[in-house]
Image: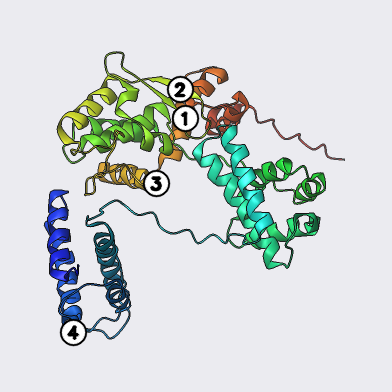
C-alpha cells in the first residue's frame, strides 16, 4: 500500500510533539515536509525512497544559489524519519550516531585478526573506552598495511610500524603520540610479534607532563556559591559542576551515572568506572546531594533512560559525549564570572587532586578517591602542587671567580 508524504508528515509532527520537541524545531520540520510534498506532487504525493534520495540532494539555497548546510541537515533528518516510517510504520526519534570515517581493512585475513582481537579484549572485560581505543588503532594499522600493498600478516614488518606512526602525525599533536603508541602496543603483544614491538620502541614516544593550571581558592568559592544559590544555573548543571569539583569524576562516569547508583540515605554514590572497570564508592557532600535531589525531583524530564543526567531537548536521553559535560561546566563558570581560564572535567579533576594534596592527603588515598587502577597513576597530579614543588628547587651554585 502506497504511503503519502502527508501521512508521514502528520505522523512525524505528532511524534515530535509527543516527545516534547520545541515548537521552533517542529516548525523547521514542517517547512521541510512542505517542500517534500511539493516535490512529490508529480507522483500524486506518494513517498518513495527514491524520492527521498532526490530530496536530500537538493542542498542549494534558492535565496543565495549556494550550498546550504542548514538545508542539507534539515532534509537528511526528515528523510531518515520518512524512510524508517516507510519500512516500519513508526517514527524513530532515537539519536543517531555519526557514521565512522575510520578506514577499515577489507582483506579476510585482517578482518579475522580484528575479530579475534575484539574477542580477546571482551574476554578480559576491558572498559568500553579502552575497547574502542585499542580496537581503532589495530583497525587503522591493518588498513594502512592494505594501502601499502601488504595483504597478509606475515608480510608486516618494522618499517610498516614506523610508517604507520608517521602517517598519524598529521592527525595527532606531537605531545600525544605517546597515547597512539600506548593504544597500539597491546595489539602487537596479542599477535606475539616481538619484531614489531621492537620497531614500536624505536618511535621513542614519551608522555609530556606539563604543570596544569588549577583554580584559585577565590575562584572556587565563587563557583560553589553560584551553584548554591543563583537561579541562573539549573540544579542539573550545578550538580554536574559540584560533582566534578569535589570528586574529580571523569566525564564518562558522570554521563553513565545511573539513578540506582546514588545512595540517597547513605549520601554516597557507587559506580563501576568506565575507564578501569573498577568499582568506586564516593561520599556526596550535602550541597551536591541537595542539587542532585532538586534536579531529579523537579527538573529531570520524564524518560525511560536510566542515567541521572538527561538532555533538556527531546529526545530526552543521556548525554552523547564528553563535549556535553565540557559545555555545561564552561557555561556555568562563564556565567559565574570565572572566565579567565579554560575549564572542563579534566581540569577539575586536577583541581580536586590538588585540593587533596594541599590537605596533606596520602597519595594512596588520593588514588582511591580518583579511582586509579594503579597508585602510580596519581604521580602525574603532583605537578599541581606548585608550592611543594618550589620547596624542592635547589639553589644554583655560586661560581667562584678565578
Residue that mark 3 sits on: 321
Q: Quadrant of residue 140?
A: bottom right
| Mark toward the start of the polypeptide (1 vs 3) | 1
- How far apart in space, not on screen, are marks 2 and 3 (Cα)? 21 Å
Q: State the quadrant of the N terminus.
A: bottom left
Residue positioned 22% across, 57% down in the render: 89
Residue that mark 2 sits on: 280
158 lies above or below 256: below
Are the residues at dot 2 and dot 3 in contact (C-beta closer than 8 Å)?
A: no
| Mark toward the start of the polypeptide (2 vs 3) | 2
- Give residue 100's position: percent from left, percent from top: 48, 58
Q: Secondary structure at mark 4?
A: helix
Q: Secondary structure at mark 3?
A: loop
Q: Quadrant of residue 247?
A: top left
47 lies above or below 123: below
- Give residue 211's position: percent from left, percent from top: 56, 39
| Mark toward the start of the polypeptide (2 vs 1) | 1
- How far apart in space, not on screen, are marks 4 and 3 (Cα)? 43 Å
Q: Secondary structure at mark 1?
A: loop
| Mark toward the start of the polypeptide (4 vs 3) | 4
Are the residues at dot 1 and dot 3 in contact (C-beta closer than 8 Å)?
A: no
| Mark toward the start of the polypeptide (4 vs 2) | 4
- How far apart in space, not on screen, are marks 4 and 2 (Cα)? 62 Å
- Please give the label number shown on residue 26: none
- Give residue 47's position: percent from left, percent from top: 22, 72
Note whether residue 191 is visible.
Answer: yes
- How far apart in space, not on screen, are marks 1 and 4 (Cα)? 56 Å
- As rendered, which of 400 and 252 lies closer to the eye? 252
Q: Secondary structure at mark 2?
A: strand
Are the residues at dot 2 and dot 1 in contact (C-beta closer than 8 Å)?
A: yes
Q: Which of labels 4 and 2 is toward the front?
A: 4
Residue that mark 4 sits on: 42
Amino acid at each position: 500500500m502506497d504511503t503519502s508524504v502527508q501521512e508521514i508528515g502528520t505522523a512525524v509532527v505528532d511524534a515530535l510533539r509527543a516527545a516534547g520537541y520545541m515548537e521552533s524545531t517542529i516548525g523547521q520540520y514542517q517547512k521541510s515536509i512542505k517542500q517534500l510534498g511539493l516535490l512529490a506532487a508529480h507522483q500524486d504525493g506518494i513517498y518513495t525512497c527514491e524520492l527521498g534520495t532526490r530530496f536530500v540532494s537538493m542542498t542549494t539555497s534558492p535565496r543565495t544559489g549556494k550550498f546550504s548546510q542548514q538545508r542539507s541537515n534539515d532534509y537528511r533528518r526528515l528523510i531518515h524519519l520518512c524512510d524508517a516510517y516507510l519500512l516500519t510504520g513508526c517514527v524513530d526519534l532515537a539519536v543517531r550516531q555519526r557514521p565512522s570515517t575510520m578506514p577499515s581493512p577489507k582483506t579476510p585475513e585482517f578482518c579475522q585478526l580484528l575479530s579475534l582481537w575484539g574477542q580477546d579484549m571482551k574476554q578480559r572485560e576491558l572498559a568500553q573506552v579502552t575497547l574502542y581505543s585499542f580496537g581503532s588503532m589495530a583497525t587503522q594499522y591493518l588498513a594502512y598495511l592494505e594501502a601499502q600493498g601488504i595483504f597478509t600478516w606475515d608480510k608486516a614488518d618494522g618499517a610498516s610500524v614506523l610508517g604507520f606512526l608517521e602517517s598519524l602525525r598529521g592527525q595527532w599533536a606531537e605531545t600525544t603520540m605517546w597515547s597512539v603508541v600506548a593504544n597500539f602496543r597491546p595489539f602487537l603483544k596479542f599477535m606475539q610479534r616481538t619484531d614489531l614491538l621492537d620497531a614500536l620502541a624505536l618511535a621513542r614516544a614519551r608522555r609530556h607532563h606539563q604543570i596544569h593550571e588549577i583554580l584559585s581558592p577565590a575562584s572556587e568559592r565563587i563557583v560553589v556559591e553560584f551553584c548554591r544559590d543563583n537561579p541562573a544555573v539549573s540544579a542539573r548543571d550545578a550538580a554536574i559542576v559540584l560533582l566534578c569539583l569535589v570528586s574529580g569524576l571523569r566525564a564518562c562516569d558522570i554521563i553513565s551515572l545511573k539513578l540506582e547508583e546514588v545512595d540517597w540515605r547513605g549520601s554516597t554514590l557507587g559506580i563501576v568506572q568506565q575507564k578501569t572497570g573498577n568499582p568506586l564508592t564516593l561520599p556526596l557532600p550535602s550541597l551536591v546531594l541537595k542539587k542532585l535531589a532538586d534536579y531529579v525531583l523537579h527538573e529531570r524530564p520524564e524518560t525511560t533512560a536510566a542515567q541521572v543526567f538527561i538532555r533538556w531537548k527531546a529526545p530526552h536521553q543521556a548525554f552523547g559525549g564528553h563535549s556535553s559535560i565540557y559545555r555545561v561546566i564552561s557555561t556555568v563558570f562563564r556565567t559565574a564570572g570565572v572566565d579567565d581560564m579554560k575549564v572542563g572535567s579534566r581540569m577539575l579533576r586536577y583541581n580536586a587532586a590538588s585540593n587533596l594534596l594541599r590537605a596533606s592527603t596520602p597519595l594512596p588515598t588520593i588514588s582511591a578517591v580518583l579511582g586509579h587502577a594503579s597508585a602510580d597513576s596519581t604521580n602525574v597530579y603532583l605537578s599541581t602542587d606548585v608550592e611543594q614543588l618550589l620547596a624542592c628547587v635547589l639553589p644554583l651554585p655560586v661560581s667562584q671567580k678565578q
